[in-house]
Image (cartoon, rainbow, N blue to C red):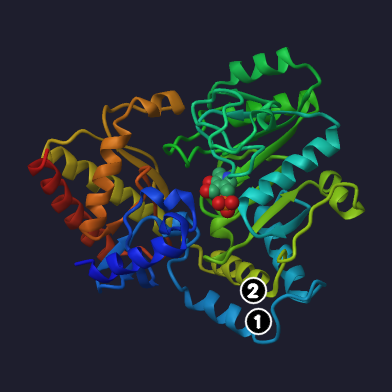
Amino acid sequence: MTTTSADLAERAARVIPGGVNSNVRLSAPRIFFEHGRGARLWDVDGNEYVDYLLGQGPAFLGHADERVVAAVTRAVSSGMVYGAQHELEVVAAEHIVEALGWADSVRLGVSGSEAVHGALRLARGATGRRRLLRFAGQYHGWFDTVLMTFDGNTGSPATVGQPADHLADWVVVPFNDLAAVRRAFDAHPGEIAAVILEPMMCNNGAIVPQDGFLQGLRDLCTANGTVLVFDEVITGFRLALGGAAERFGVTPDLAVYGKALAGGWPVAAIAGRGELMDAFGAGTVNHSGTFNGSVMAAAAVTATLEVLRDDPPYERIDAHGTALMAGLSERADAAGVALHVQGIPVAFHVSFGRSGVISDYAGLASLDLDGYAAFAQRLCRHGVWVAGRGIWYVSAAHGSAELSDTLTRFGRALDDHVANR
Ligand SMILES: Cc1ncc(COP(=O)(O)O)c(C=O)c1O
């Protein structure tokens, strides 16, 4: 039953374009949530869902984690934004630097898109170069200078209103293809300011870097005086406390964070080596923002990182995700549905289609992504809240009850799918 959601959707459509505040949500079911607790959500009609979308990633500790809520509530009662400094932002920065282990300093912001923008400006400022290199199928935010069709067609705007020449400086190559990166450096000697990447692809598929790929990028960047930027907006604090850099053992020059950093609060960060970051401090490279380092943001970051440090959920998440990936595959096999499950337990991708490991966007595009997107809507109707693009995120709050409920509901959704095929 979703009557109240349907009524709200009608009201929303009158005053909010498309009824949503982010275009990513245009294709998602129009369910209105009343509250979330732990790994579950409840909608305004009283339906309950096990949540593997986690708000597109931020609810890594689960919804309304008491420790984060208490810290933000306590801090916010004495003020929110000063346009000046306060102690908590220093504490938050100390926590981030300590958690990452490799970065000297950090600037806070609000969204991942801005953080990417700042990191690329910093890289261009430091190198005096314009050109940038990225990987097909990766998403780095919605700004004009980075938004691009996923297929890696260099310079293809992904939206009406985006001038194609804003994309003129990009070189796009396939993920996991070190030879292609090498060729790009050879074709543009001394021109590439930065290589930016999701160290593990999570926006399209869940594709881990092949052995030696990240280290190869590291070496090529060092040899060419190019800044290596990890876009850890998804992977940061999720793949390990020190993110993908820690998990895969390769250190970037700059990295951007968001989502899991602040227990659901809107916070992003640019972290990096001192020689680069100091350009912000000297004022030679501009990075600004009214809400940067607000009291709420600093409190949320501090509380989240203290939880992750003192009560690390990574092993629990690994166990849950491993059992979940296996359980989904088993149920699909039993129902005679070809399910493609790939990734790591904390972030994996599910689609219909062939088996076999996929290593780049072209491989991903060969799956039945549209068929799965339709199935994801069916899953939501059966009480498993997931993204249509196939990513499943496991949080610190998912436990055995969620595992068992999810597998039961997944089985029912599959039966429904098979009956309606
Ligand atoms: C890897 C990556 N970079 C950047 C962004 C942009 O972050 P935001 O949506 O907070 O602007 C996202 C958002 O999903 C992302 O996944």
Count of marks overlaid on the render: 2
Viewer-nearest residue: 180 or 399: 180
Name the side, left or right, on which 272 lies relative to 40: right
Residue type pointed to by label 1: Ala
The residue labelled by disc 1 is 75
Q: Position of residue 23 (x, y in %)?
A: 47, 49
- Relative to residue 251, is residue 13 depicted above or below? below
Could you tell me which residue is drawn at 84 percent across and 32 percent down? Answer: 127
Could you tell me which residue is drawn at 53 percent across and 35 percent down? Answer: 158
Q: Is mark 2 within 8 Å of ligand 1?
A: no
The quarter in which the C terminus is drawn is: top left
Residue 174 can be seen, yes or no: yes
Name the side, left or right, on which 55 lies relative to 232: left
Q: Position of residue 338 (x, y in %)?
A: 20, 33
Could you tell me which residue is drawn at 68 percent across and 28 percent down? Answer: 165
The quarter in which the N terminus is drawn is: bottom left
Q: Secondary structure at mark 2?
A: helix
